[in-house]
Amino acid sequence: MPKAKTYNLDGLETGSIDLDEKVFGETAKSELIYQVVRVAQNNKRQPLAHTKMRGEVRGGGRKPWKQKGTGRARHGSSRSPIWKGGGVTFGPRKENITKLSIPVKMRKKALRAVLSDRVKDGKFIIIDDLAKMAKPSTKKMHNFLKTLKVLSKKVLFLSDEKLEKTILSLRNMPKTNSTRLENINILDLMGYSVVMIGKDSIKKLEKQLS
């Protein structure tokens, strides 16, 4: 059964906790994790590039010149794609950004596998007295991470309700970020080498990913 060490806010080890084998003992092929990451990155894209077609550009309501007798080519609108200032043919459109999907079971399996790797590498930090923090203190969290020798690493805090003081304490620290348990995603887990969580939130995380 996987185990993880627990610490108090002073950075001192207070013991260990048994973790759910089904969640923190997961293994997955690199192809699965790649697929989940690819879907997440694709769906994160913001459709910014957008061109107008001939029916959307301004002007062009009148026929430029009569059909016959001028010696010039016939045209029906100055907003034709072959005219300067006209519409764009086959240009990028916002609605052309395709959203990808992936089964929930595959996504959860990838999340469990990444968390399991953090536990195996000793980079899954559990704090057992977060609720006792009286007020936000960046200095206290700075000293905590410094004691554990992870101050120079990228740390992701999986926050839960009633832990707003901890979130505020980490907000101004570089290389540190917070996300709610409900919003946990593969990109955050892959982007941060150390995961930090409160002891009281472990059961909720295990239930969410089981």
Image: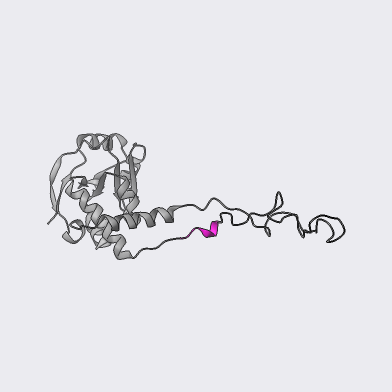
Q: Quadrant of residue 153?
A: top left
Q: Residue at x 47, y 60 (%)?
A: 98
Q: Nearer the viewer, residue 14 or 55?
A: 55
Q: Residue at x 79, y 56 (%)?
A: 73
Residue pushed farthest right?
69
Please give left or right for residue 54 compared with residue 186 in the image: right
Q: Residue at x 68, y 58 (%)?
A: 54
Q: Is residue 68 above or below residue 4?
A: below
Q: Position of residue 175 (x, y in %)?
A: 33, 38
Colour convention: one colour
Instruction: Give the mark count.
Output: 0
Q: Position of residue 67 (x, y in %)?
A: 83, 61
Residue pushed farthest front?
71
Q: Position of residue 97 (x, y in %)?
A: 50, 58
Segment tinted magenta in the rendering: 94-99
Q: Position of residue 134 (x, y in %)?
A: 28, 42
Q: Quadrant of residue 56?
A: bottom right
- Residue 172 visible at all: yes
78 magenta-colored: no
Q: Nearer the viewer, residue 155 or 98?
A: 98
Q: Residue at x 75, y 54 (%)?
A: 78
Please give left or right for residue 69 compared with residue 163 in the image: right
- Residue 201 visible at all: no
From the image, which quarter does the N terminus lie in? Answer: bottom left
Please give left or right for residue 55 compared with residue 148 in the image: right
From the image, which quarter does the C terminus lie in? Answer: bottom left
Q: Nearer the viewer, residue 95 or 143?
A: 95
Q: Quadrant of residue 170?
A: top left
